[in-house]
Image (cartoon, grey):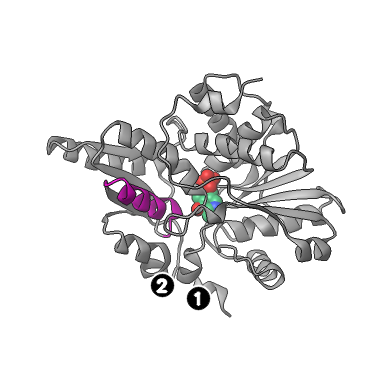
Amino acid sequence: MHSVSQLISKFPRAELISLPTPVERLDRMSNKLGIDLWMKRDDLTGLSFGGNKTRQLEYYIGAAVEKKAHTILITGAVQSNFVRTAAAAAAKFGMKSILQLEERVPDMGSMYYSSGNVLLSNLLDVEHMYFPEGENESGADAALAKRAAELVAHGQVPFIIPLGIDHPPLGSVGYVKGGAELADQMPEFDVGIVPSGSGATHGGLLTGLRLSGINSPIYGICVRRDAVQQKNRMNRLTQKLAELLDIERPFKQEDILTWDGTLAPGYGQVGQKSLYALKLMAQTEGIMLDPVYTSKTFAGLLGLLEEGRILPGQKVLMLHTGGLPAIFSYQESLIN
Ligand SMILES: *Cc1c(COP(=O)(O)O)cnc(C)c1O
């Protein structure tokens, strides 16, 4: 077996987090649900409210620093946590950032466009671009490439953090490392639960865990696409990740689990199940979940329990990926 630290040592890493993040037992929620529930607190990675993107950015910013980039360019939803954290990481390394915001969520109120991550990005002093089509990943990447070419023409060195699935998933390397870290902290558990959006987190964590000898089922809870589409995406992403690491993928396609029972009403929209899950976690453990990802993910855990895919008494690990600033931009959907 490969050692994870050896495999990833060839990628330059910008230190953004003090690791490891804590793993905590949720005692009251465990009692309530009749399981043995643990949470890895990647909402506590720090750096401008933190979250899972900070791990991914250690490798993107590492590459940007190596390239001596002046400016990073990144695209995401209006309330993207990735975009906000990237701007913070760029600031820490003395780079500028250009953030492209995509229209992905219909019918949102004014807070969606001004509070939460948008507010933080404005405080970080960034250049904003706007992209009207939220479902056009290659178009969004092409728009960044065009802006980057303008910078090059002015003698600047840009660095693009791409969105599309055809690029090497460098950010996933951060979660390969995260998987090894989790395996050290918790060498045995029955079921793992993670959100699955771009898939960088789910794919990296699954790879890191398998490389560390942990073979428990890891469910990716769908936050953006249905379970079939997401499984296809994860299949491609994890193949590309294995290529990037220069190994054979340490698991088969059947080992990729996706579940979409809490995806409705769609990406970035708060359904009844998510709202229930968010309030249950807040009122039982005092831990906040975000409206877009982690509330759907915890609602997914409750759904898997209901369906009998998680059994009473089992040891369950949920990854908390952060995203908390979005609570403030979703207040119209959360208070009713
Ligand atoms: C982006 C994001 C996710 C999804 O992670 P991917 O790596 O894109 O799949 C989950 N939770 C939060 C809070 C996020 O910001």
Residue 7 lies, in percent from the top left, at: 54, 24
Residue 67 lies, in percent from the top left, at: 28, 31
Q: In the image, is residue 294 above or below residue 66?
A: below
Q: Give left or right: position of 289 versus 25.
A: left
Which residue is rendered at x = 61% and y = 65% of the image? Answer: 271
Which residue is rendered at x = 67% and y = 35% of the image? Answer: 256
Query: Could you tell which of marks 1 and 2 lies nearer the N-terminus?
Result: 2
The residue nearer to you, when weighing 238 against 3, is 3
Q: Amino acid at mark 1?
A: Glu
Which residue is rendered at x = 55% and y = 28% of the image? Answer: 5
Residue 164 lies, in percent from the top left, at: 43, 38
The residue nearer to you, when weighing 92 against 288, is 92
Q: In the image, is residue 292 above or below residue 279?
A: above
- Quadrant containing the N terminus is top right
Q: In the image, is residue 117 above or below residue 248?
A: below
> Can residue 193 be seen here?
yes
Q: Amino acid at mark 2?
A: Met
Q: Give left or right: position of 306 versus 21.
A: right
Q: Quadrant of residue 44?
A: bottom right
Disc 1, SS: helix
Q: Main secondary structure of the magenta part?
A: helix
Number of numbered discs overlaid on the protein picture: 2
Give the labeled residue for mark 1. Answer: 332
Q: In the image, is residue 107 above or below residue 126?
A: below
Q: What range is drawn magenta here? A: 79-95
Q: Which mark is residue 111?
A: 2
Q: Quadrant of residue 36?
A: bottom right
1 and 2 marks in contact (CB < 8 Å): yes
